[in-house]
Amino acid sequence: ATLTNVTRWFLTCVNQPQFVKVLGQISLCEKMVPVISKPGAAPVPPPKPKTEAQLKKEAKNREKLEKFQKKKEMEEKKKQEKKLAKPEKKELGTISYDVPTPPGEKKDVLRPLPDSYSPQYVEAAWYPWWEKQGYFKPEHGRKSVSEPNPRGVFMMCIPPPNVTGSLHLGHALTNAIQDCLTRWHRMRGETTLWNPGCDHAGIATQVVVEKKLMRERGMSRHDLGRDQFIQEVWKWKNEKGDRIYHQLKKLGSSLDWDRACFTMDPKLSYAVQEAFIRLHEDGVIYRSKRLVNWSCTLNSAISDIEVRAVHIRLWPCPGQGGVWSPGFFHEEVIVATTRIETMLGDTAVAVHPADPRYQHLKGKMVVHPFCDRKMPVVFDDFVDVSFGTGAVKITPAHDQNDYEVGNRHNLAFINIMDENGLLINVPPPFLGMKRFEARKAVLQALKDLGQFKEIKDNPMVVPVCSRSKDIVEPLLKPQWYVDCADMGKQAADAVREGRLKIIPDHHLKTWFNWMDNIRDWCISRQLWWGHRIPAYFVTVNDPSVKPGEDMDGHYWVSGRTEDEAKEKAAKRFNISTDKITLRQDEDVLDTWFSSGIFPFSIFGWPNETQDLSVFYPGTLLETGHDILFFWVARMVMMGLKLTGQLPFKEVYLHAVVRDAHGRKMSKSLGNVIDPLDVITGISLEGLYAQLNDSNLDPVEVEKAKQGQKSDYPSGIPECGTDALRFALCAYTSQGRDINLDVNRILGYRHFCNKLWNAVKFAMRSLGDSFVPSEKAQLSGQEGVSDRWVLSRLCAAVGLCNAGFQAYDFPAITTAIYNFWLYELCDVYLECVKPVFSRAEEDSVSQSQAAVCRQTLYTCLETGLRLLAPIMPFVGEELYQRLPRRQSQDASASIHVTSYPETAEFCWHSEEVDRQMDFVMTVVRTIRSLRADYNLTKTRADCYLQCIDSETVTLVEQYSLQIQTLSLSQTVQPVPATGAVPEGCAVAIASDRCTVNLMLKGLIDLEKEVAKLTVKKGELEKQMEKLRERMEKSDYKEKVPVKVQELDAEKLRQSQTELEKAKEAIDNFMRMM
């Protein structure tokens, strides 16, 4: 009996769904094996017979278990039924455009529109047609660009992307904004040019090609030689370098591709050479030996923008982990350092002039521990008394602060490191050591001499090269510099005097801080790819002229050719050219130098070309605020210096794109989004594949995959170019950061679908024989809905133009979105449906329908022109389906039509807007009542009790609109003194109107009361439980604040629901 009970219990357990899920099906042994007691073991006593109470308890437990199992089975069954009943989530449809259309030919717009919007269908074929038609060229529609245009000229140059680059969201944002502005100016009738270009990206490109050479041929650039290596770079550029241009076209960028420029093209290279020579002859460019940011891996100086400051507490030197703070002492002087190997180049010890500990050392010398070098103790304000011992070693040739101290105190500059990071000019055994090996060796040598004191942790900033990831060394090198003092003052003054406007103005502080404290700019780069510096070192073969040194600018001349340079040298030294030998500088110019003259070099400067006279100075420079100094400031300085004019009148700086969580875009976080993936869509597996192909290490790849799985569990859906552009513009508030959420971009794809359906409905409603009026104007026959929607259209026109003028892109997108979605689709289209449905009843109905068709056409045609600069593809696709007014070119693109302006669309009426606001308040109140009483399909009579005769007249005027939008059977105004029939639900719409919705006869009152009574009881029970919990003495102390807030909100909501239920019960009781 016991065995039977155990078996039953065991079977009950293992057949539970939870057990089956983990263990699978369990089968019992068929053969029973008796348990044999061990010899000598005590005999097992027979089980005691169970009492009646125990047996009853077991039976009760079994019953409970069976009930529980039945309940679980029922729940599972309901779950399955619900799953089957629930409709599948509709997938976003992909429809392809499959009509054979040769590139450049117009797309077939005669076939019907597909059922729903599909980016793939919409974006096909339009761009090549726009390009072939010449719509992006400033010459379009005029004989010549120099032809006077009363509308004016708009010119903007693209911030040239790196030739090595590939599109990222920063580019997408830049191009979305710039293209919107360009298309808007073009549609306004201005002579418009958006000039494309690409930057040669000296370091980045050289690194890419060097890696390719090593990977494919096992060769370095030195194996090839300079000329052959440059040929290899050009070969790579011609094969891969226009990739980013194709991506820009995918974004719909309306650039004039015939004017595309590459910074290494002959035209731009000549301008760079000319700029250098002119600035050198004016003394603005000069030769000097100073500290530069040196990358030992790249063997080149790098700009400040390529140096990343890494904050650490532990020094990440190869093979070691610790911050060095040792010191050597001599006559009681102990100094601290974080870079111990540089002590081999020390030439002084510095202390603060006010430090009492070292006053007795004035005029004294200290002796270097590794050589007999005697070094002065100098007193300088830069020393921090509280750091270390208050005494610091000075290495003028290897530290920026020490360099300045060295200049102030006329100290010796000893360079102890070569270009590869190997030690030079030091005693053995350190000579020839690598810099980080020397660090360990110097420390050990100090310990061996007994002159090492201690090591302490020290927070510090390490400069790291963003290109090669190696630690940057400050090195003394003779380089070419630009004197920026006067140019910086002129650039600052241009903004102070209002000649140059920076938008938004919170960047002004940064601008003035940089310009007022500007340092000279090192423009030499020790690379092969780039503009070779047109400067020559002069050797004079004449004993009357002493030999010059590399750092002496007097022995350098610049020239367009070697012959010109020789002539200059002969004149300078007053000797014949045959005694001159020249050596051209091996270095190339900093990439930012050619970028700095980009706004005028693209037009053929220094030659006086037609394009230069028409398009320079430009109108606007739009870019990210992160390159305000590195690019924008240099363009302003060089434009003023070389042309005497500002390169543009305004600078608009957009925000930096971050992810939906506000984090900076980073490959290792997996949140870097390729805009093309948003446009075409990509699976999670596809995102993973991209990570696997990247150069991230395995740990970072896994971390990035987790980030992607969290943010895009189903991948990124296909959103299309228009939705991406609209989202980027909608996000661009004039702040510093944009947190971009892909789900919001998807929301704008749904908005495109709404546009699509609106136009499809309109096409059916207009009919094949519809002819639009010659121009958009009021006929005087418009009904209240027509006057209102045209008023809202005029308001949208005003908001869009004001937004473009103020660079307020969210204002533009909001105006377009609200007009199309909430005013045209949600209100006007619903209002005109009954008008169109009874259009043929009589002549009055026909006339009314004709007016509505003209209004609808004006809204669609104007609305599409409003959104065309932001959504070029869907704007074009839908516009091409509409009939044209007689004054319009039937074959032309929407992008060369005029942008709607307030002078033409001047029918905005605040009075009509106020009336419709009142009507929509009434409609929303009726809809709310219908929802409260679950009147989903049933139409009820509606009585609107009005406070005065003016409101009664207004309700009568808009009764059809109220009836249509609120799904009412009838709408009847009732004066304040008038009686409302019994059986109505009541709600106050405003201080002027009360809504009475007739429910009697539409619903089963007793059934509704019973339902509401049950609901009331449940709410009261819930609230009682919640109050009991909240009134406990330890509630405030034990329950987290967040939970307390949720409880309070839950109680408030329940109270509101309870009051509504009581009110409804009372109302129903009165009806009964």
Image (cartoon, rainbow, N blue to C red):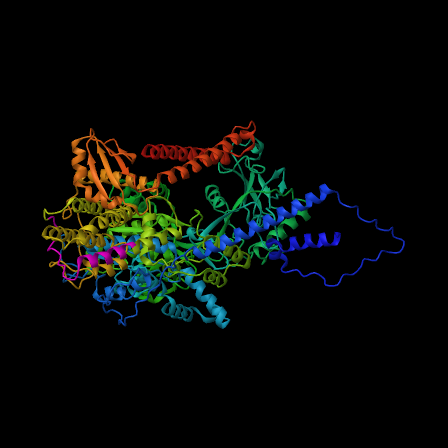
In-front residue for pair 331/105: 105
Residue 429 lies in what quarter of the image? Answer: bottom right
x, y percent for residue 46 = 82, 49
x, y percent for residue 447 = 67, 47
Residue 294 in view? no
- Residue 766 is left or right of residue 470, and the answer is left
Q: Residue furthest top?
A: 1033
Residue occupying image coordinates x 52% and y 28%: 1031
Question: Which image quadrant: the C terminus?
Answer: top left
Q: As displayed, is residue 254 above or below residue 656?
A: below
Residue 422 in view? yes
Q: In the image, is residue 767 part of the stretch drawn in magenta?
A: yes
Residue occupying image coordinates x 56% and y 36%: 390
Q: How many marks?
A: 0
x, y percent for residue 824 = 23, 49
x, y percent for residue 124 = 29, 65
User: Where are the magenta residues, as a range?
Assistant: 754-778
